[in-house]
Image (tube, rainbow, N blue to C red):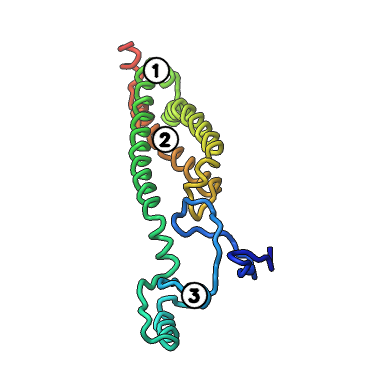
Amino acid sequence: MIGARGGTGNDTRVVGVVQDGKYRSMREAPLPYSYFPIAQSYSPRVTLVTRVDGDHMAMLPALRRAIQAIEPTLPIYAERTLETQLARAVVGERGGATLLGIFGAVALLLAAVGVSGLGSNGVQQRIHEIGVRMALGATRPNVVRLVVEQGMALVLVGVGLGLVGAVVLSRTAASLLFGVSPTDVLTFALVPTVLTGVALIACLFPACRATCIEPTRALRDN
């Protein structure tokens, strides 16, 4: 590749190869680009990319002076850092991620309400059993553990299936992620932990209500 010639009349020679880049969208596939010296291929719109150490914005005055020393009449505009440029490039993705985050929070709230309701229904159906257990000496911690175990069993199965599905779909989601791996360890550890914690709290509400059951009344009513 290096040294190869091309173009009209073979007047272009390859002097180097650079990594692929994205210019129009973060979603685009790498496209073949050729770079020419500005003196040989002038364009009225030129983007100057510089790499500096320290405060990027503090270097702007020095960069302006260096450019104006070469061409005083050259207009300079749209100065921005790489972070700003990347933020503009993914503004649509950030908006979509924020919207999905809101939907996820609402879904988590609804799931917590559902788990709590399921636990309450389970307590109501087992009120006679709980009354018998308490009459035979079961303590409040025993009752809480009984109700929580029943609710968390389904939750843990759901979390496990969700993790398997996330791993399977991770490659599909790779094109939608920027700056994070589709199999990010922190994400795969944090999300199940949060889900399990919220479900545990939701299970504690009916479990605490179950400890308030009076054994004699539970046996008499059933």
For discs 2 and 1, the disc positioned in front in the rendered view = 2
Mark nearer the N terminus (2 vs 3):
3
SS at mark 3? loop
Q: Amino acid at mark 3?
A: Thr
Tell me the residue that label 1 is attached to: 126
Q: Which residue is mark 2?
A: 199
C-alpha span from label 2 to label 1: 20 Å
Mark 3 crowdedness (10 Å alpha carbons): few <14, some 14-19, many ≥20:
few
In the shown orientation, is residue 100 left or right of residue 28?
A: left
Above or below, comparing residue 91 to residue 204 in the picture: below
The residue at 47%/59% (across/down) is 23
Helix, strand or loop status at disc 2:
helix
User: Mark 3 sits on what residue?
Assistant: 50
Q: Amino acid at mark 2?
A: Ala
Q: Nearer the viewer, mark 2 or mark 3?
A: 3
Q: CA distance from mark 2 to mark 3?
A: 50 Å
Position of the C terminus by quadrant: top left
Q: Is disc 1 in contact with disc 3, using a CB cutoff of under 8 Å?
A: no
Q: Determine whether, in the image, residue 156 is placed left or right of residue 11.
A: left
**Mark before the other along the chain sequence, 2 or 1:** 1
Q: Position of residue 151 (x, y in %)?
A: 44, 27
